[in-house]
Image (spheres, grey):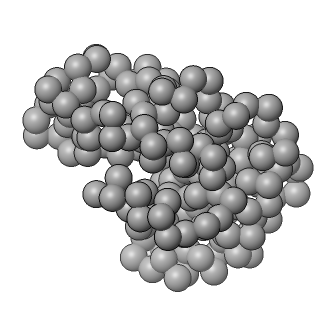
Amino acid sequence: MIDAGFRWISSKIKSDFVVKVDSDSVVHIDRLHRKLLIANVMNMWNHWFVCYNAHESPLIRDRYSKWYVPESDYAPAYYPRYCIGAGYAMKRDTFEAIVERMGKHKVFEIEDAFLTGVVAEDLGKVAYVQRAVAREYTIFSDCNANGELSLSITEGQFRHYGGYGTNLAAAWRMLKQQYCNQGW
């Protein structure tokens, strides 16, 4: 489970930032690190995530859905704001605060909603920096229509384009060649 992984990282790994990425994704680490350094300097909030995020998303109560959460695990009908998508990043202070507070909640399997939403609510004000990521990725560029830099490419998003969905190494080679010249 992701909560065990978070506790292990907390006890064994020292870093300025922590990134969680889905297994079917590739990340351009240099670009991500630059964006995290900028987010850290520019952000006035004590706690922040870099991610695409959802707000007031309804919980799935259909027990046959892979996103099913029973009311006994989490009673509200809507999630709080949380990171959604291929991954998320946070500064170390935010990560440690999440690890410290996650034991106060009943864990459910939608880890991004649980950790970056439900547990993050305990932190008070949290910024969700969306500018460094784009929800829609394309094989033609890692910039979205607003010139925002994509940090990852997921397998599912490439299933229909030239075999990238089954070859993450090819997706990585493509990502390395792309560059967004439009700031931030």
Give residue 93's position: percent from left, percent from top.
Answer: 63, 46
What residue occupies the far top of the structure in this picture?
77
**23 relative to 81 in the view: left or right:** left
Above or below, comparing residue 177 to residue 31 in the picture: below
Of 124 and 144, which appears nearest the observer? 124
Give the residue at x 52% y 82%: 169
Residue 141 in view of the camera: no
Above or below, comparing residue 107 to residue 77 in the picture: below
Of 30 and 65, which appears nearest the observer? 30
The quadrant the N terminus occupies is bottom left
**171 relative to 156 in the view: left or right:** right
Q: How many labels does the image show?
A: 0
Give the residue at x 57% y 23%: 124
What residue occupies the far left of the structure in this picture?
63
Give residue 61's position: percent from left, percent from top.
Answer: 17, 27
Q: In which quarter of the image is residue 113?
A: top left
